[in-house]
Image: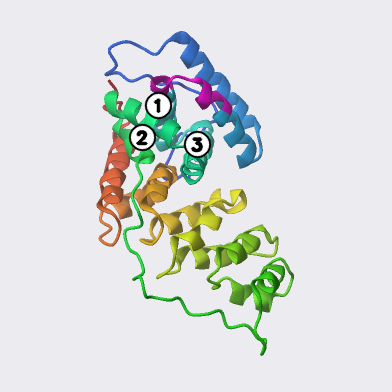
C-alpha cells in the first residue's frame, strides 16, 4: 500500500473487531494478534516474518486462524503498516502451503472461513488453475544464446548464476524452471528482468513459480502486480496475492476481462472494504 492510497500508514497496532460479530474475540486471541504483529514488524526479512506467522497460525484452531487472517486483510486494506507486512508474509505462507500440498490444513481453514462467512479471505484459500493455458501441443521458443554449440541444462544453470549480463538477459526467456530459479537467486538480476519473466505470455505456470517463491522478489509490489495480471499464473496464487496490492491496481482489476472472474469479483470487494472502512463481513 502506498501513502497516496492508504493515508493511515502508522506503525501503531490497532485491532478493530467485527461489529457484526455476535460476541467479541476472546481477550487471549486479541492479545496474541497484537503481540504477533509487534514480533512480525520487528523482523527485517520476509522469511522470518513467515516463520513467525507459521508458528502462530498452526497452533490456533481453524476458526481462530481465519479470524486472525481476516483482521490482517482489513488492517492491510486500511493501510496499517504492521498488518501490510504481516499479510504479505501470510500470503506467501498460504502459497507455500498449497505448493507443499498441505491440503488438510488449507481445507480446515477454508471450511472455517466458509462457516463464519469471512468472504474477505475465502478466496485466498481457494484453488483455481491458470485462467489461460497453452495447448497440449504448443511449445515455447527455445532460448537463443550467443553460443554455436548445444548447451546443456547444467551449463545454463551455471550461466544463470554467473555475471555475464548478455547471458542473463537471454536466460530470462528460458523454458526450464530450474534455470529461472537460479536467476531469481542471482544478485545481478534486476527488477525489470523479474517483471519480464512474470509478464511473459504465453508461458507455463512452472516458469512463474520461482518468482513467487523468491522472497527477494515477492516483496516487490510491481512484481506481485505483474503476476496477478498474468492470466497464465495459477489463479489460486493470484487470489492469495490480491489483497496485498495497492488500491489503484485493485480498482483496475475490477474490470479485467482476461483474468479469472473471481479476481475481478474479489477486487471489487477489497476496494469496497477499503473505501468504506467498515466491518461488514464477519459473523
Circle 1 SS class? helix
Residue 255, located in which quarter of the rendered image? bottom left
Circle 3 SS class? helix
Q: Crowdedness of circle 3 by 10 Å Cα count: few (<14), some, many (20+)?
A: many
Counting residues from the start of the chain, the first of labels 1 and 3 encountered is: 1
Residue at horizontal 37 percent and vertical 46 percent from the top: 239
- Residue that carries the numbered disc 2 in the rendered image: 121
- Residue that carries the numbered disc 3 in the rendered image: 90
Q: Position of residue 98 (x, y in %)?
A: 46, 43
Judged left or right of residue 48, residue 71 is left
Q: Position of residue 277 (x, y in %)?
A: 33, 31
Q: Crowdedness of circle 1 by 10 Å Cα count: few (<14), some, many (20+)?
A: many
In front: 188, or 130? 130
In front: 250, or 172? 172
- Residue that carries the numbered disc 1 in the rendered image: 66
Q: Crowdedness of circle 2 by 10 Å Cα count: few (<14), some, many (20+)?
A: many
**Extreme right residue here?**
163
Judged left or right of residue 181, residue 261 is left
Does the CB distance between marks 1 and 2 fall below 8 Å? yes
Residue at horizontal 59 percent and vertical 52 percent from the top: 214
Q: Mainly helix, strand or loop, the magenta region?
A: helix
Residue 178, located in which quarter of the rendered image? bottom right
Does the CB distance between marks 3 and 2 fall below 8 Å? no
Counting residues from the start of the chain, the first of labels 1 and 2 encountered is: 1
Amino acid at each position: 500500500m502506498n501513502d497516496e492510497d492508504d493515508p493511515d500508514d502508522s506503525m501503531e497496532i490497532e485491532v478493530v473487531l467485527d461489529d457484526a460479530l455476535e460476541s467479541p474475540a476472546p481477550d487471549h486471541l486479541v492479545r496474541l494478534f497484537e503481540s504477533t504483529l509487534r514480533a512480525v514488524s520487528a523482523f527485517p526479512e520476509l522469511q522470518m516474518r513467515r516463520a513467525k506467522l507459521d508458528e502462530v497460525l498452526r497452533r490456533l484452531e481453524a476458526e481462530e486462524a481465519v479470524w486472525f487472517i481476516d483482521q490482517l486483510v482489513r488492517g492491510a486494506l486500511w493501510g496499517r503498516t504492521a498488518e501490510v507486512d504481516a499479510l504479505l508474509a501470510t500470503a506467501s505462507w498460504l502459497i507455500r502451503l498449497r505448493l507443499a500440498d498441505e491440503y488438510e490444513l488449507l481445507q480446515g481453514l477454508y471450511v472455517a472461513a466458509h462457516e463464519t462467512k469471512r468472504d474477505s479471505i475465502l478466496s485466498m484459500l481457494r484453488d483455481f488453475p491458470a485462467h489461460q493455458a497453452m495447448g497440449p501441443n504448443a511449445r515455447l521458443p527455445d532460448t537463443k544464446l550467443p553460443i554455436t554449440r548445444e548447451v546443456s541444462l547444467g551449463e545454463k544453470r551455471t550461466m544463470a548464476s554467473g555475471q555475464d549480463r548478455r547471458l542473463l538477459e537471454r536466460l530470462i526467456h528460458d523454458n526450464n524452471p530450474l534455470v529461472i530459479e537460479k536467476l531469481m537467486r542471482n544478485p545481478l538480476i534486476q527488477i525489470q528482468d523479474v517483471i519480464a519473466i512474470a509478464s511473459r505470455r504465453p508461458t507455463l505456470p512452472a516458469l512463474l513459480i520461482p518468482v513467487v517463491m523468491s522472497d527477494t522478489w515477492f516483496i516487490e509490489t510491481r512484481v506481485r502486480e505483474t503476476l496477478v495480471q498474468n492470466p497464465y499464473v495459477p489463479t489460486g496464487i493470484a487470489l492469495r496475492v490480491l489483497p496485498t496490492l495497492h488500491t489503484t491496481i485493485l480498482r483496475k482489476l475490477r474490470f479485467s476481462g482476461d483474468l479469472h472472474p473471481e479476481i475481478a469479483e474479489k477486487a471489487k470487494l477489497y476496494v469496497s472494504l477499503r473505501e468504506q472502512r467498515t466491518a461488514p463481513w464477519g459473523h
